[in-house]
Amino acid sequence: MKHIEAGDPMTAEVVSVVTSTSFKDVAKLLAQHDNNGLPVVDEEDRVLGSSPRAT
């Protein structure tokens, strides 16, 4: 079995959203980047949480 480290599947370029980003725009970004969630950040790029996956 191959040993996988936390950084192996990591994305180098992070796409994030701010709290005022519309859910429609979040859904578009999720689809464009084939992602299950996006970090939600404040004005200083501090992580506040994660957006839900668009369904």
Image (tube, rainbow, N blue to C red):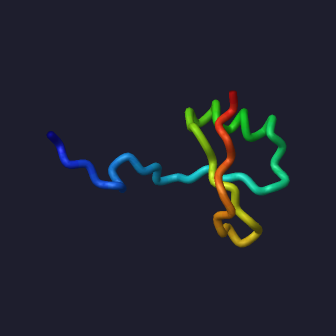
Above or below, 28 relative to 17: above
Work out which quarter of the rendered image holds the N terminus and state it.
top left
Q: Position of residue 36 (x, y in %)?
A: 57, 38
* Residue at far top of view: 55
Viewer-proximal residue among 52 and 30: 52
Q: Which residue is drawn at 56% across and 37% down?
A: 35
Q: Give the residue drawn at x 42%, y 50%.
A: 10
Q: Position of residue 8 (x, y in %)?
A: 33, 50
Q: Residue 2, image x and y in percent?
A: 17, 43
Using the rendered view, name the quadrant where residue 40 is placed. Answer: bottom right
- Count of picture labels: 0
Q: Does 11 appear above or below 33?
A: below
Residue occupying the point 58% across, 36% down: 33
Quadrant of the image for the C terminus?
top right
Taking the spot 72% from the left edge, 52% from the top edge, the residue there is: 17
In the displayed orientation, state which residue is furthest to the bottom.
Answer: 44
Image location of residue 43, percent across then percent down: 76, 68
Q: Is residue 27 left or right of residue 13?
A: right
| Residue 45 to residue 40: above or below | below
* Above or below, comparing residue 31 to residue 41 in the picture: above
Query: Left or right: where does residue 23 sit relative to residue 37?
Result: right
